[in-house]
Amino acid sequence: MNAIESIKYITPELILLVFSLSILICGLFIRKNNVLGVFSLVGVIFAALSLYQSSATSLPIFSNLLLNDPFAKFFKEIFLLITSVVILISMGYKAFGEEDRGEYYFLLLIVTIAMMLVVSSNNLLMIYVAFELVSLTSYILVGFLKRDALSSEGALKYFLFGALSTGIMLYGISFIYGLFGTTDLSVISVALTAGGTNNFIALISLILILAGMAFKCALVPFHMWVPDAYQGAPTPITAFISVGPKAVGFAILLRVFLKNFFPLFNGWVDLVTWVSILTMTVGNITALTQTNIKRMLGYSSIAQAGYILIGFVAGTALGIKAALFYLLVYTLMNLGAFGCVVLISNSIKSDLLEDYAGLYKRDPPAAFMLAVFLLSLSGIPPLAGFLGKFFVFAAAIEAKFILIAVVGVINSIIALYYYVRVIKYMYLEEPKADSIEPKSLALQAALIIMLAGVLVVGLCPYPFFNWIAASSNF
């Protein structure tokens, strides 16, 4: 399908582009946070309505560079949910200067467009270009607090690791092009299925591409940027990069490895199994000693990536559905947890765990919501996190990957300690201060939405199962 005919299939992206440029211009004249935030949210809502009304017909568009399929539509819906919640959280975040709001919301919408393009990509070079837009915008957002040394340090480390992993991924793509004479994933898939290719070289190329994806997903050993970037970034951006780019990475892993390179499954599955085991274990064990809640949640997000990877390792239809379900659940839990961190830090001016002491006496709703999100992250029933872990473990057992399921269960028990430690501070320690800052209505709305999501998905999961079952065909 040529470019003119294809334009109607990227209407949500075009809507976001128009709103982002309008916000950038309006930001020169409008300094009020809520005005620009509401305008950004309206743009996301219009894009979501356009996406909802569109049909995902698995059509190749823009000369087969992009695909309009249910798999891409699922992730686009997730990204619009993430962006809308992050906008609400940002409207309640007090560390931003009024003069920077226009640029901030502009970058947030641009990175959303880039993520939507990545998950639709059907060409390795298109994946690379869209990935670079996601990466470059994310680096800027992490370092957005220009006068904060931690923010600058986190952005620099994020950039250096990102540049290295991107170079490795591009090297792998060049091998693929040399082997197949194309970067079109559909053509490569047909060639692999037909046989006659050098599987060893193809496997080496895939491992190099996996390195680039591992950076985005925060998988060991490409995880070392996470704690500093998460601690230094503005907390709404920490929430964003903990779920948005990570979901992009897993979307590409599923599309590239399990759809187009599945004939090589036996060649790379053992490597990815050990990556998952190490990611879960390193993330959880390192989180045990953290005293800063953003760093603790950073290491927690590394471990959560290891759990999601279990569904990918299974490589079955159930494994794909389990990975998608866990991504949805993880989005709700992690956005909610970081939203609570913003709400609490506005009052106590600290992200240290010890300063959360006695929070339930000073702010019972905030303590309750954070406790729910942390218990869901640890996998306590009947919250959504329990079902997420149950399904990825079930997928691994069904596919005969018993070891990784057992390691996942053990890691879940380890993780319970540091999640419950935060709850202990909030409910069993005496408060150090009694003052409570006025709460942003937008931030409270975001937290209520995420709390409702965690409870509803955990208690009534069937509509979400049906949604994911319809979206898992790529």
Image (tube, grey):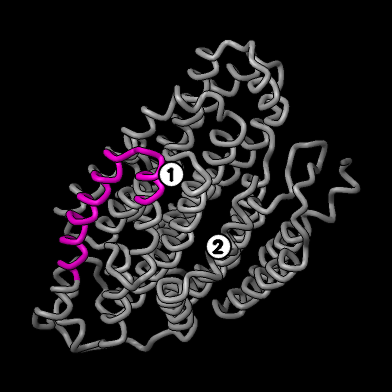
Residue located beneath label 1 in the image: 217
Give the alpha-carbon distance from disc 1 to disc 2, as whole Å.
23 Å
Badge 1 density bin: few <14, some 14–19, many ≥20, Cα 10 Å = many
Viewer-nearest residue: 24 or 422: 422
Q: Residue at x 34, y 42 (%)?
A: 225
Residue 100 appears anywhere in the view: no
Q: Which residues are magenta?
A: 393-422
Q: Residue at x 21, y 53 (%)?
A: 287
At label 1, the amino acid type is: Cys
Image quadrant containing the C terminus? top right
Q: Is residue 448 above or below residue 152?
A: below
Residue 443 placed where, x, y %?
A: 45, 79
Q: Is residue 431 above or below residue 324?
A: below
- Magenta stretch: includes residue 411: yes
Q: Secondary structure at mark 1?
A: helix
Viewer-nearest residue: 166 or 118: 118
Residue 363 appears anywhere in the view: yes
Residue 329 placed where, x, y %?
A: 44, 63
Instruction: Write down the quadrant of residue 170 in the picture.
Output: top right
Q: Residue at x 24, y 44 (%)?
A: 407
Badge 2 density bin: few <14, some 14–19, many ≥20, Cα 10 Å = many
Q: Is residue 13 left or right of residue 144?
A: right
Residue located beneath label 2 in the image: 104
Q: Is residue 153 left or right of residue 255?
A: left
Viewer-nearest residue: 94 or 193: 193
At label 2, the amino acid type is: Tyr
- Magenta stretch: includes residue 260: no
